[in-house]
Image: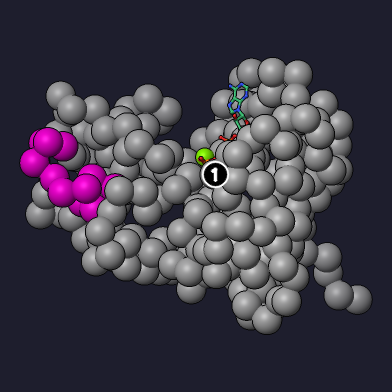
Amino acid sequence: MASEVVPIVQLSGVRIERGGRAILRDVSLSVAPGSITAVLGPSGCGKSTLLAALTGELRPVAGSVQLFGQAIPQRQRALLELRKRMGVLLQGNGLLTDLSVAENVELPLRTHTDLPPPLRQQLVRMKLNAVGLLAAADAWPRELSGGMARRVALARALALDPPLMLYDEPLTGLDPIATGVIMELIARLNHSLGLTSIIVSHHVHETLAICDQVIVLANAGVVFAGTPAQLHASTDPLLRQFLDGQPDGPIPFDAAPRARSA
Ligand SMILES: Nc1ncnc2c1ncn2[C@@H]1O[C@H](COP(=O)(O)OP(=O)(O)OP(=O)(O)O)[C@@H](O)[C@H]1O
Ligand SMILES: [Mg+2]
């Protein structure tokens, strides 16, 4: 008998409203353990909203969100425990400027564990080593390039060894070289540490290059779910418009049409 693999993330029929307006409608998706999923879509389509539903920050008004095979808990304490199992890299790096690189990475360990300082520092060195920045441990955030700062934020997101990593626009503001470094790092960490990753991005081609599954959001719903090869082969006009970066087509690029239909 084949054993069922429990998805790390499972959404079914999720509806999320903000300010009385449906931002996401009837969203269903499943993320397999060990995979990298890209969530793509034009600006304002609800990508960050989807991540907020995964962290429990936003609650769906309909449908269900399951992480690690369990519904997101209602109680604050249980929710905080669950959040320790998710590493989140937000669009801004969120590094504290008055702490060194090592102190920034140590912060989650200080806040959420009782580990003695020597052990914490050893873990910090391991995380910095994993992102190739051990030599920058004593630097200040202001001394880092954009790409280095993003890697430090990544090391900090990994501090508690979360099995699930969520990335919101990890490439914003990076030059092409730093972009390549970050994407390679996300893929390598996912596979070497046995993580599961969800990358929200509007950098279509860079993200498709490393993902196993693609979800495209548009018009408040999922318009595609499949492999990168299936997406590339699609002849759907909406998907072609998005993939080929055409300015005109079925995806509305201002919020007004969607606001009327919500
Ligand atoms: N706090 C809020 N209250 C009401 N509406 C909001 C709020 N935050 C976002 N929205 C709306 O929700 C929609 C989706 O926003 P979201 O940030 O999820 O989009 P996104 O796909 O992440 O966009 P981007 O690519 O620009 O980051 C937008 O129309 C936005 O105006
Ligand atoms: Mg966003």
Residue 199 showing in the rendered view? no
Q: Looking at the image, in which quadrant does ligand 1 appear?
A: top right
Q: Is 262 placed left or right of 8 in the picture?
A: right
Q: Is residue 64 left or right of residue 217?
A: right
* Direction front: furthest residue: 248
The residue nearer to you, when weighing 205 against 120, is: 205
Q: Position of residue 170 (x, y in %)?
A: 40, 50
Asked whether residue 188 is drawn in magenta, I would say no
Task: Give the total number of marks visible in the rendering.
Answer: 1
Q: Amino acid at mark 1?
A: Ser
> Magenta segment range?
139-150
Estimate the x, y position of residue 104 in percent, counting from the top left: 25, 34
Disc 1 C-beta below 8 A from ligand 1: yes
Residue at 83% of width from left, 65% of height from top?
4
Q: Is residue 2 visible?
A: yes
**Residue at mark 1:** 43
State the image coordinates of residue 251 (x, y, percent, origin top left): 67, 52
Residue 83 vertical placement versus 45 (above, below): above
Color encoding of the figure: one colour
SS for callout 1: loop
Q: Quadrant of the N terminus?
A: bottom right
